[in-house]
Image: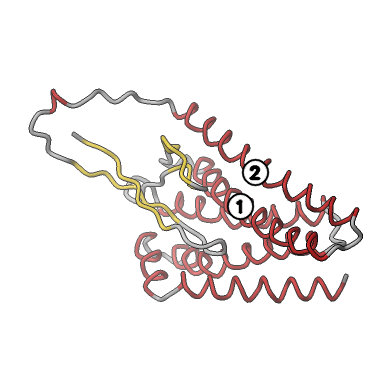
Amino acid sequence: MSILIITGYCYGPYQPYYKVMSDITIDSASPQDAAPVKKIPDKVRLQRAAKYHGTRALVYLAVFAALDAWLITTDGLLLAQLLSVVAAYLTGSYLAGVFHEWGHFTGARLANAYSPAATKVRGAFMFGFSMTKNTAQQFLSMSIGGPTANWLLVMLVVVMIPIDNIGRIALLATVFARAISVLIFEGPIIRGVMNGGEPQAELDRRIDAGGLDSSQVYGHIILAVAFLTLLLML
């Protein structure tokens, strides 16, 4: 019986991630006893993922908007400020993760890469990418899509939301820090593959070199610096 195993690297709110999907074969003593597996069309799985992420994104945004309105109407009440910052951080982290994942997915599909949508969405993850079935160019397209989507989110926040209170500053600082931390981790991988390296080898090398830990540390530092800088400019 041949099945697909999806293994993933998923980290904190500032750390990027990749999924590697590999085929394995499991011997079954009684294959006729196995329950039939109903295949779900890729389009249906994508619709489920869009609904899953879209619904949660709206909830996060609604909570942030409500607290933002409370902050404005209470003329800077301390509790309103604190809750607005917390909501901004959670909302920005979730949106950054979802944008990043869909950016990777879009890059993969634009390159016609083997990237089936996941049967069950887990957090931000919603598709698999096969290192063995896809080429280095397809890997690059998939990889570049993630950071590109993060910077698109940064631009959307800047253009659509006036950065004029502490909660909105926290939102911008969060998505900005995530966009930078993604580049810190994924940039060397992308550069290595562009220079002729093997995708899996470059990914493993970056992880072994402590790139995940450093991207998390730098992500938090960048968040703090961006938040304080924007706050002083308010």
Pointer 1 residue: 94
User: Which percent across, then down, holds residue 55?
Assistant: 62, 37
Position of residue 230 measured from the top left corner of the image (x, y, whole percent): 80, 71
Numbered disc 1: secondary structure: helix
206 or 175, which is in the foreground? 175
Task: Give how far across and how far down residue 157 sits, in percent.
Answer: 76, 54
**Left or right: 27 with respect to 49?**
left
Residue 195 or residue 144, whichever sits in front: 144
Q: Amino acid at mark 2?
A: Ala
What residue is drawn where x is 40% and y is 69%? Answer: 207
Say above or below: 2 vs 77: above
Q: Are marks 1 and 2 in contact (CB under 8 Å)?
A: yes
User: Alpha-carbon neighbours of circle 2 within 10 Å: few (<14), some, or many (≥20)?
Assistant: some
**Residue occupying the point 52% across, 31% down:** 48
How far is mark 1 from mark 2, CA to CA? 7 Å
Question: In the rendered view, would you say 221 is above or below 53?
Answer: below
Residue at the (36%, 61%) spot, across then down = 198
- 103 relative to 116 in the view: left or right: right
Mark number for residue 57? Answer: 2
The tag earlier along the polypeptide, 1 or 2, is 2
* Numbered label attached to residue 18: none
Q: Mark 1 is on which residue type?
A: Tyr
Task: Name the foreground residue: 234 vs 78.
Answer: 78
Residue most extreme to the left: 29
Q: Quadrant of residue 225?
A: bottom right
Residue name at image x 55 percent, y 55 percent: 144
Q: Counting other residues with Cα less than 10 Å from the Cα at mark 1, is it few (<14), some (14-19), or many (20 or more)?
A: many
**Is residue 121 placed above or below 196 in the rendered structure?**
above
Of the 4 image quadrants, the one containing the C terminus is bottom right
Q: Is residue 187 above or below residue 49?
A: below
Q: How many marks?
A: 2
Q: Position of residue 205 (x, y in %)?
A: 37, 70
